Amino acid sequence: MGIKKISKDGFSGLIEGLIAETTVIGVQSKGDKFVYDLLGSSANLRLDYDVTILPPKKYFLQPAEILLRFDGEKYEAEFDDEEFVLVGVHPYDMIAINQIDKLYSEDNFDSHYMRRRENATVIACDVARASENVFASSMGTATVSEGFDILLTDIGDFYVAESATDKGEKLLGKAEGVSTAEDEDLKAREKIQEENKKNLNKHKLGCKPSELPGLLEKAYNHPIWEELGKKCFSCGSCNQVCPTCYCFNVQDEVNWDLKSGTRKRVWDGCLLDGFTKVAGGHEFRKSRADRIKHRIYRKGKYVPEKIGGEIACVGCGRCVGACLTDIANPVKIYNRLIEDIGIGK
Amino acid sequence: MGKPRVAIFDFACCEGCQLQIVNLEEEILDLTGAFDVVEWREAMSEQSDEYDIAIVEGSITRPEDEERVKNIRRRAKILIALGACATIGGINKLKNNFELGEVKEYVYGKDSEKPHLDTAKTKAVGEVVKVDYKVHGCPIDRDEFTYILRCILLGKEPEIPEWPVCVECKAKGNVCVWEYGQVCLGPITRAGCGARCPSSGFRCYGCRGYIDNPNVEAAKEVIEKYNLDIKDLKAKMKLFGSGYEPTKK
């Protein structure tokens, strides 16, 4: 696939055209923050944003969704078949989506998630402004090379636009103001990406991400988990805003006929009391300390072991800002462990 | 087997939670189709001493109320506490922070010593009799109320959140109101309301009561972080979170 450049007016025109024919979700301002929301006009699109309150995950794994309907005798799965375009996905969030794609297509193929994923056209964009807590540079997620249909990089009057799929290629083909990306444009893009690889780093991890599973191997009985547990509300805010958290709960809701109803799934979170409650009322991670430890192990060891080594924290920094008691920052936790027990064997 | 007989009773409260049942509008036909409502002062004139399910709204604030609710409990197979006054004592428990004489004089003035104005410390229904199901909130959430009723009909344990309001608030993509200087009780209050107040720009008032295992120490830490006074937190916790004994200063 090719790399082109598109004028900003050309891109606005492309978005207006898309809004007229399909559902377009884009990053917009909400007070002094940013959110993904239904886009009504290309003028509202803010590709200069720093970070969104919630990651774009919510369009693939919705906070609450109906999986199937039953009538007492048979059931039928319910799917969202609406095509949509998602505009403005930052590299770290794209990498998080790529990870969930893997997790939800292996083992049990999650048809609800994957259907939405197939229905989506993703226009990603390089970060133009570092957020307060981003540490993507530390996690190797400041730039992205796959998963998107188009990747934009703002180089002033133009975007460099890389299409990675037929869908992306076709979309760019419809736009006006598209021209060949010259050497200088590619160099401008490279400069921005190289800078992001260094500068999206408000919290600096004291080791390579690949060393985290080994570090955690030795940290199971470290006192930090109890220390953090004392300050934890178990509010799950760190889970809710995380682009790589993908746990859910399934509930049946039965109508007044006591036969028909819906099976729903809703976001769940490993920090919540009751997350590990099983039949008979047993709960195997009852203490806050155990639940905090599980979150960090999940991101730094268990999921990486499942998906080929990639760390399941992409350094978006949302949990750092969402945690009222300031204990969720993974870098702070990892660095403390490095200091206390070292990364060597 | 006939339809389960339901009776709805009220104690000290504003009756707003019963009003939420009335406000079910067309769904009320589903309710009366599934249950035989035999007593409900707010909506009908019939009365009955025979029922299977008692729905009790309000808190218990007088000695004679204790007897009345015990009598209801004896007759009912299932007792449901309806709304914050019934589930946690609610706003009525503010009274417990003062001397009873002082409270009576404040409210009734020169008549405060008249015998029919006798009063006692406020109790939640569960502090007097066994409660089988709680419908939290001030007022209750109608959907949650009908969900619990359907669970009872199905013989299924309703899933009531054990986690705080922050879960629902974050899922809605709200900006945390603590960032705007509000002392929000969301982190220690039971979810299930859909984070209604913080989603409308207000703080959480705590009307669904505390979660099973609230971390009050962490709450104190947040007060320090935002340079607020611990008194602000305590004052706000008193509204729905007062106990049987006066809240410590």
Image: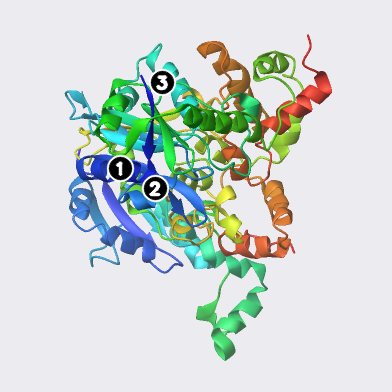
Query: Which residue is situated farthest in the bottom direction here?
Result: B110
Residue shown at 53% from the left, 46% from the top = B166
From where the camera sits, is residue A56 visible? no
Label 2 and label 3 in one chain: yes
Chain for disc number 3: A
Q: Position of residue B68 (x, y in %)?
A: 44, 61
The residue pinned by badge 3 equals: A101
Image x and y of residue A57, in percent: 42, 33
The type of residue carrying mark 2 is Leu
Q: CA distance from mark 2 to mark 1?
A: 9 Å
Callout 1: few (<14), some (14-19), or many (20+) C-alpha neighbours within 10 Å?
many
Residue A141 appears at what percent x and percent y? 56, 26
Earlier residue among tags 2 and 1: 1
User: Disc 1 to disc 3, how far (Cα)?
Assistant: 26 Å
Q: Identify the element where label 2 is drawn.
A: loop
Tag 1, which secondary structure? helix
- Mark 2 and 1 residues: CB-CB less than 8 Å, in contact? yes
Count neighbours of disc 2 (C-alpha within 10 A) and say few if under 14, some if 14 to 19, many if 20 or more: many
Instruction: Identify the residue position indicated by label 1 in the image.
Output: A15
- Report the residue at 17% width, 23% height from top: A74
Task: Tell which subunit mark 1 falls on.
Answer: A
Residue plotted at (65% across, 27% down): A138
